[in-house]
Image (cartoon, rainbow, N blue to C red):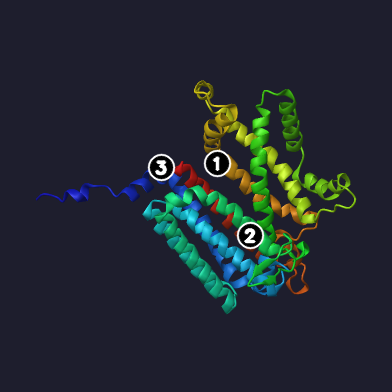
């Protein structure tokens, strides 16, 4: 009797378990102990989440976490800004995700998360409808981005910059003092004071403004540190080394207290602008060192070959050096962006009520005293979602380039 050849083919999963987890008596005992410990921790956390945690603190203060004290009558501005960002995000995803299988899996995960969020989140009917419309626009734009990637790629960076300015104008209203003329009617936006920008809204604005400003400044500092001009080189070296030797919280306090002393008496910067200045000053120094690492990875022969072809110095930097240097340090740059996003939590110590600051004010409410675990787990989940999204984007950029 001839046995079935397929029966002699080992099960790869069982083979992997036997090789890596149960290859000796000691590893087998250690594996069983770890599994029991993980089951015990999972059971305890699940029991606390379902039976003991009081999630009413999240439900009651839902709006405070996301938009703080932003006027409820002006929420439509935030929805429009979110819609513009989602459309551009979908276009960018469609352009850089040419693999159809990866796109389907990722969009399926996003649809599942959105459905779970709409089911659990205590949203009103208008908010649910707005989220569904924005999600539909994002999915449609991702499909359009995949089909028209050749036409979209040259304009995607400019579109992101313009969308950021438009979103900032929408949220602030009076940040840019101008009037829209529509059908001979002057339609103006009332300004929303920055002390009403709270919660996740302020965190995202501070993080993205600081990232956009610190990135080019860091590149200039890195190029200046490798310059042949002694004055430029030593200025950049002193700036980088001094700033890297100071803690961020100290720089934030200096920006809030000392920066107004160097400005004219009739010029008073807003607290948000001063905080952005502190974050940019701090992040640019670290960004410069990340970029300098990429500059040092470029072989000297490429620079000499470019000059031999007749390229001027600025063209050598823009066309030969920087593209390769930035591509080589994408993980370090994105890591710096993630660190800067999380560093915005320190702004609560200088009087700005961002996501961590609003959490501190919520746990101080008399009816929710002691609800630290629920509140900080919730904002920790929000931080993780944004940071992990940036990490996934960096991995995709590495594969793309």
Q: Secondary structure at mark 1?
A: helix
Q: Which residue is mark 3?
A: 24
Q: Mark 2 or mark 1: which is in front?
A: 2
Residue 123 drawn above or below residue 172:
below
Residue at x-position 75% and y-position 69%: 369
Residue at x-position 58% and y-position 56%: 386
Q: Secondary structure at mark 3?
A: loop
Q: Which residue is mark 1?
A: 331
Where is residue 352? Give x, y as percent: 77, 58
Where is residue 357? Give x, y as percent: 74, 60
Task: Please tell me which residue lies in front, 385 or 189.
Answer: 189
Which residue appears farthest toward the left when viewing the image? Answer: 1
Query: Which picture quadrant has residue 199?
Result: bottom right
Residue at x-position 54% and y-position 75%: 129
Residue 298 drawn above or below residue 335:
above
Q: Which residue is mark 2?
A: 166
Q: Secondary structure at mark 2?
A: helix
- Crowding around mark 3 (Cα neighbors within 10 Å: few <14, some 14 to 19, many 20+) is few
Q: Mark 2 or mark 3: which is in front?
A: 2
Where is residue 282? Give x, y as percent: 72, 42
Residue at x-position 74% and y-position 69%: 190
- 45 sits to left or right of 175: left
- 99 sits to left or right of 331: left
C-alpha distance separating marks 3 and 1: 38 Å
């Amino acid at each position: 009797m001839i046995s079935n050849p397929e029966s002699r083919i080992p099960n790869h999963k069982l083979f992997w378990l036997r090789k890596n987890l149960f290859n000796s008596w000691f590893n087998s005992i250690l594996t069983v102990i770890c599994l029991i410990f993980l089951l015990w921790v999972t059971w305890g956390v699940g029991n606390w989440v379902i039976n003991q945690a009081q999630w009413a603190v999240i439900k009651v203060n839902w709006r405070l976490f996301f938009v703080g004290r932003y006027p409820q009558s002006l929420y439509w501005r935030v929805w429009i800004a979110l819609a513009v960002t989602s459309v551009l995000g979908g276009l960018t995803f469609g352009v850089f995700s040419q693999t159809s299988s990866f796109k389907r899996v990722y969009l399926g995960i996003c649809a599942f998360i959105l459905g779970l969020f709409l089911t659990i989140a205590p949203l009103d009917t208008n908010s649910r409808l707005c989220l569904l419309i924005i999600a539909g626009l994002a999915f449609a734009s991702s499909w359009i981005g995949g089909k028209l990637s050749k036409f979209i790629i040259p304009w995607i960076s400019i579109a992101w910059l313009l969308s950021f300015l438009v979103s900032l104008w929408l949220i602030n209203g009076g940040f840019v003092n101008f009037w829209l003329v529509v059908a001979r009617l002057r339609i103006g936006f009332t300004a929303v004071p920055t002390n009403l920008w709270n919660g996740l809204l302020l965190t995202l604005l501070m993080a993205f403004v600081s990232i956009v400003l610190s990135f080019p400044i860091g590149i200039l500092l890195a190029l200046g540190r490798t310059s042949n001009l002694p004055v430029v080189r030593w200025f950049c070296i002193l700036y980088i080394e001094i700033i890297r030797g100071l803690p961020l919280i100290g720089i934030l306090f200096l920006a809030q207290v000392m920066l107004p002393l160097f400005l004219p008496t009739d010029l008073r910067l807003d607290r948000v602008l001063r905080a952005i200045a502190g974050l940019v000053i701090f992040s640019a120094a670290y960004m410069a060192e990340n970029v300098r690492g990429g500059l040092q990875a470029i072989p000297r022969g490429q620079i000499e070959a470019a000059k031999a072809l007749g390229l001027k110095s600025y063209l050598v930097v823009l066309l030969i050096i920087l593209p390769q240097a930035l591509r080589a340090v994408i993980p370090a740059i994105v890591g710096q962006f993630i660190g800067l996003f999380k560093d915005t939590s320190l702004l609560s110590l200088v009087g700005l009520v961002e996501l961590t600051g609003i959490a501190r004010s919520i746990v101080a409410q008399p009816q929710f005293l002691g609800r630290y675990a629920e509140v900080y787990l919730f904002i920790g989940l929000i931080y993780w979602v944004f940071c992990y999204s940036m990490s996934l984007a960096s991995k995709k950029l590495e594969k793309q380039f």
